[in-house]
Image: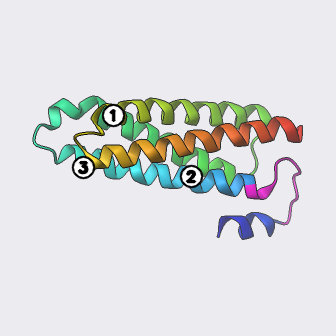
C-alpha cells in the first residue's frame, strides 16, 4: 500500500525511486513491530531482569524505526536529515540485532527480532546509497 500512496503524491519531489522508499518504510514498520513484540516477550520470560538491556534496546530500536518510517512517508526531509535519520535507524537496528543475537539460542522471539533488525538495517543502508546515487 505504501508504494501506490507514494506514487500518487501530487508533489513529485525527485530523489530516490518511490519503490526504494516504500521498501524501507515497510522494513522499518516490520522491525518496529518485531522489536515491540520481542520486548514484551522478554518481560514474560522467567527472569526478565536478565533481559533489561535487550528490552531497552528493543524499545529504542522500535521508536527509531517508527520515526524513520513516518519521516520517509512524508517525503519532506532534506538529504541531510534523511541521511542522519537513516544512519541512526541503521545503527539502532544493528545494536538491537547484536543484543537479540546474544539471546537467540534461548528465545525464539529474539532470533526473529534479530532477523527483522538486520533486514531493516540493510534497507536503511540501501536507501542511503540510493539517496547518494539520486543526488538528492
Residue 130 rendering spot, x and y as whole percentages: 79, 41
| Residue depicted at x 61% and y 40% | 122
Q: Which residue is mark 1?
A: 56
The answer to which of marks 3 and 1 sits earlier in the sequence is: 3
Tag 2, which secondary structure? helix
Q: Which residues are magenta?
A: 10-19
Name the quarter where the C terminus is drawn: top right
Left or right: 106, with 123 as reference point: left
Residue 94 rendering spot, x and y as whole percentages: 49, 32
Q: CA distance from mark 2 to mark 3?
A: 21 Å
The answer to which of marks 2 and 3 sits earlier in the sequence is: 2
Numbered marks: total = 3
Q: Is residue 17 magenta?
A: yes
| Residue depicted at x 64% and y 35% | 85
Q: CA distance from mark 1 to mark 2?
A: 20 Å
Label 2 packing within 10 angstroms: few (<14), some (14-19), many (20+): many
Dots 2 and 3: beta carbons under 8 Å? no
Q: Nearer the viewer, residue 133 or 56?
A: 133
Residue most toward the left?
46
The dot on residue 41 is 3
| Residue depicted at x 16% and y 32% | 49
Q: Which residue is mark 2?
A: 27
Label 1 packing within 10 angstroms: few (<14), some (14-19), many (20+): some
Residue 44 rendering spot, x and y as whole percentages: 16, 48
The dot on residue 72 is none
Q: CA distance from mark 3 to mark 1?
A: 13 Å
Q: Nearer the viewer, residue 72 or 120?
A: 120
Left or right: 62, with 1 as reference point: left
Residue 77 rendering spot, x and y as whole percentages: 75, 42
Tag 1, which secondary structure? helix
How was this image coloured? Answer: rainbow
Dots 3 and 1: beta carbons under 8 Å? no
Amino acid at each position: 500500500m505504501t508504494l501506490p500512496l507514494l506514487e500518487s503524491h501530487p508533489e513529485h519531489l525527485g530523489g530516490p525511486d518511490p519503490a526504494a522508499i516504500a521498501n524501507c518504510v515497510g522494513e522499518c514498520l516490520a522491525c518496529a513491530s518485531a522489536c515491540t513484540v520481542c520486548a514484551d516477550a522478554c518481560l514474560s520470560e522467567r527472569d526478565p531482569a536478565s533481559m533489561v538491556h535487550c528490552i531497552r534496546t528493543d524499545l529504542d530500536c522500535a521508536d527509531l524505526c517508527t520515526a524513520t518510517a513516518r519521516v520517509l512517508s512524508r517525503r519532506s526531509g532534506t538529504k541531510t536529515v534523511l541521511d542522519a535519520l537513516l544512519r541512526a535507524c541503521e545503527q539502532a537496528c544493528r545494536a538491537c540485532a547484536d543484543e537479540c543475537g546474544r539471546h537467540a539460542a534461548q528465545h525464539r522471539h529474539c532470533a526473529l527480532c534479530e532477523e527483522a533488525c538486520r533486514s531493516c538495517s540493510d534497507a536503511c543502508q540501501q536507501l542511503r546509497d540510493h539517496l547518494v546515487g539520486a543526488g538528492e
